[in-house]
Image: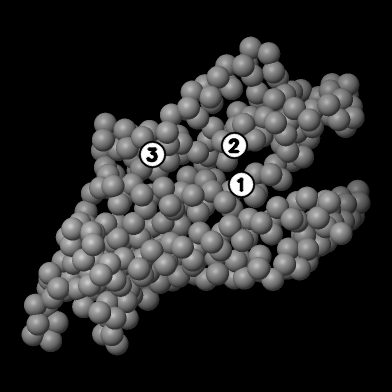
Amino acid sequence: MTQNVGSTMSRAIRSRYQSFAKTFYFFTRSPIATIGLVVVVFYVLVAIFGPIALGGNPWRMTQFLSYRGQYIYNTPQPPSLSFPFGTTFEGYDIFNGVVKAARVDIMVAAIVVLSGALIGTILGSIAGYKGGLTGDVIMRITDIFLSIPSLVLAIAFLVIFSRTLNVMVLALIVIWWPTYTRIVRGQVLSVRELKYVEASVAAGASSLRTIIRHIIPNSIYPIFVQVSLDFGNVILTMAALFFLGVGFAGYWTPEWGNIISIATTFSSGIPAITHYWWTVVIPALAILILVVSLNLMGDGLRDVTDPRLRR
């Protein structure tokens, strides 16, 4: 009996591994998607180990009032050996801020996207499978949230409650779950009519068991693509909130949008680009490269999960 159980588990693990290997093979057939994956992995490694290597407070940018006898508090220094990315206004080291911001931005994006995907998957599965009054109530609430501009809703949360990291995460989760609810509901509506779902119901399985064992696993593939794209969208939204001045308080906060906001705020906008270009361009490039890489990776995932493209 024990041998049979062990043999069954071994076959299941081997089958899962072969399925993953096949999926990864199709993914790596696209050089562009592979480049996107490599860049994303690099950013994740920087987010994990970068603040450790730099030392100091990982939630605060390093600030210099003077350097080599020169007062640099209000005079951004260009990139050099001492400051690889230069400094911005109030003496903040941009390299220090960009590296530490990777942890903040990626951590917030991961929490928001995964939480929103989980909530949306559960609600969308219930709405699609149960239908009726339950489904109508869930979808009407979803429509209400989708009808409110996302930035306006996030700003309202931060202004009403407090400008803290926890409130920002909560505000972004509230923005993101409705999209997943709508996507999953559409998938469930098509999956629930398939034969194996009808067989599960006929065998006496409960609605919860049917949803968990059959509905969600066969409706979740579009979620993977949406998750990869939404990582970039969350980062862009957070940068926009900081740029508008409603991010969690403190110029010292290591966040890419906040670094850009410091430059444009203290230089009245135009001089930051014309005279101190590095104060805006470098953190903007950090955002651009990561978001583009996430989109390239998302395109690769879409190709992998679409059987018509795996030929």
Against 206, residue 22 (above or below) is below
Label at residue 226: 1
Q: CA distance from mark 3 to mark 1?
A: 19 Å
Residue type at the position of mark 1: Gln
Q: Secondary structure at mark 2?
A: helix
Residue type at the position of mark 3: Leu
Q: Residue at x 40, y 43 (%)?
A: 169
Q: Residue at x 30, y 60 (%)?
A: 260
**x, y percentage for residue 19?**
81, 57
- The answer to whether the residues at label 2 and label 1 have Cβ atoms under 8 Å apart is yes
Residue type at the position of mark 2: Tyr
Q: CA distance from mark 3 to mark 2?
A: 18 Å
Q: Name the residue beneath numbered marker 2.
A: 180
Label at residue 151: 3
Q: Quadrant of residue 156?
A: top left
Q: Nearer the viewer, residue 31 or 273?
A: 273
